[in-house]
Amino acid sequence: MANNLEVKLLDEALIAKIKGIQIRARHLVNDAFAGEYLSAFKGRGMEFEEVREYQYGDDVRHIDWNVTARHDKAFIKTYRDERELTVMFVVDVSGSSRFGTVDKFKNEVASEIAALLSYTALRNNDKVGLIIFSDHVEHYVAPKKGRGHIWRLIRDILSYKSDSKKTDINVPLEFLNRVVKKKAIVFLISDFQGKNFEKEIQITSRRHDLISVSITDPREIEMPRIGYIELEDAETGDFIMVNTSNKIFQREYSQLASKRLHETRKFFRMNGIDYIEVNVKDSYIDPIVRFFKARDNRK
């Protein structure tokens, strides 16, 4: 009886958390945010139709400057109705995703980001799908539309409990490339603590529109000085006793973490792959909006 009550309470707490995420996501997906999303991915789901003379109210970003220069008056490119886009979330639920020292675990932040982007995609009539992974594909949800579908995605990310602590980013990307034949917008959400994933990410970025979202916790970068503690590696399960007040430990810990982040950023930058960095102690809205704006400016 006690176990049943405990399960019921857990279910109610989870439902309340999902509802909270949904309400927040719907609130954030206002006209401005949805517009940023549409601008960032414009042209991905539209077919060129014709060039016509500019009319008051047309989007100046669609001006065809070559035609305009030849005729001494403004002309714009017009497009057929937007084809539906497919947005895929590839979300890491390995051991390190269940780490958190501020207000939320990293998997909670991942679910909020996915909810925000899902509602934005829904508003633009796009389909949304999900791949949950650790060192293997844990769960797959085929792309669909609808609010009920988004509820399911949020629930799955937030509640999924993996028995595996390790990460292998190659596996879900190989799976994605097999099951999603047409080009999709892919948000790969992870802390990128796995190894040897570079080649498969490069392959995926050529087949799909890949955006990597890195989620980190402040304690993964800087350890507080609280004396001797026992630490567990979330990926391997190994334990080690350390003196967090030791200056050498502090320096080496920070240097190692900074080096890992620097190498991750460098890899994505050198390969021209979009990369969003989110720290759980800060708002994830700002880096996403900055990404949308920067991407729009590149077009």
Image: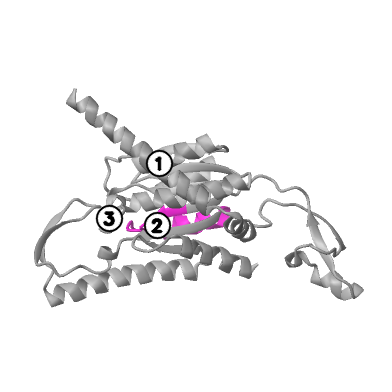
Q: Is residue 18 magenta?
A: no
Left or right of 17? Residue 255 is: left
Front label number (2 vs 3):
3
Span highlighted in magenta in the image: 188-208
Residue 101 location, x and y as percent? 25, 58
As shown in the figure, which amino acid type bears the numbered disc 3? Gly
Residue extending furthest right?
71
Left or right of 38? Residue 73 is: right
Residue to which mark 2 is pinned: 197
Mark 3 or mark 1, which is nearer the start of the sequence? 1
Q: Quadrant of the N terminus?
A: top left
203 or 139, which is in the foreground? 139
Q: Looking at the rendered structure, which numbered label has been put on residue 18?
A: 1
Q: Alpha-carbon distance for marks 1 and 3? A: 18 Å
Q: Label 1 crowding class (10 Å Cα cut-off): few <14, some 14-19, many 20+? A: many
CB of mark 1 within 8 Å of CB of mark 2?
A: no
Mark 2 or mark 1, which is nearer the start of the sequence? 1
- Residue that appears at 42% across and 64% down: 277
